[in-house]
Image: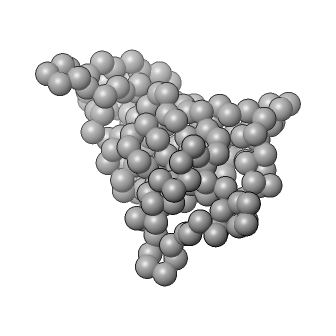
Amino acid sequence: MWETVPRLLGDSRYLVLATADRQGRPWATPVFFAARDEDRLFWVSAPDSRHSRNLAERPDVAITVFDSHAPVGGAEALYLEATAGPADDPVAALAALNARLPAGKELTGDDLAPSGPMVAYSADVRRHFVLIRGGDSRFDNVTDARLHVTRPRQGAQPRYARRAAR
């Protein structure tokens, strides 16, 4: 089921970024994003936004990618565990984001700090999970579950580990 990962990352324009502050208070926010590949995601945000301040204190994040227009019972979702912070390569982040933005809406280096109002961020994904709908005939699950998926090695069958959706 690995093929779900690149497809959802390519088809989706927004992710939900879940962060926590120093005291552990959670915060979730949608952000426009671009994927370099299945293991690196980029976005830009104001450094004083709540999620950016949280990242400065706690870089571990959870990310969900899904199509909010899917009909009930037809949803697909990607759950990611990652570490996030300011992008090591803001130029690469802008290039990836600009490839997804409409003409005339592209970002430039002037949009980024220190002269601009935003910072380019990246998330390095450690683990990928996909949604398994309840009653899926391939699995013994009555309720929705999440399935840990890994990139298959050439010639190898993918390994799966199922966990209850949260």
In the rendered view, does 107 fall on the left or right side of 119?
left
- Quarter in which the C terminus is drawn: top right
Residue found at the far left of this picture: 155
Coloured how?
A: one colour
Residue found at the far bottom of this picture: 104
Residue found at the far right of this picture: 23
- Quarter in which the N terminus is drawn: top left
Q: Position of residue 31 (x, y in %)?
A: 59, 56
- Residue 146 against residue 77 in the figure, above or below: above
Q: Which residue is at 27% across, 39% downward?
A: 3
Front one among 67 and 71: 67
Q: Position of residue 42 (x, y in %)?
A: 52, 50
Quadrant location of residue 39? top left
Front one among 165 and 103: 103
Residue 66 visible at all: no
Q: Position of residue 101 (x, y in %)?
A: 46, 69
In the rendered view, does 43 fall on the left or right side of 134?
right
Residue 116 visible at all: yes
Counting the numbered discs, the total is 0
- Residue 28 against residue 60 in the figure, above or below: below
Q: Which residue is at 31% across, 24% downward?
A: 139
Front one among 164 and 36: 36
Q: Position of residue 70 (x, y in %)?
A: 41, 57
Q: Which residue is at 68% across, 46% downward?
A: 28
Front one among 119 and 154: 119
- Residue 145 against residue 67 in the figure, above or below: above
Quadrant location of residue 57? top right
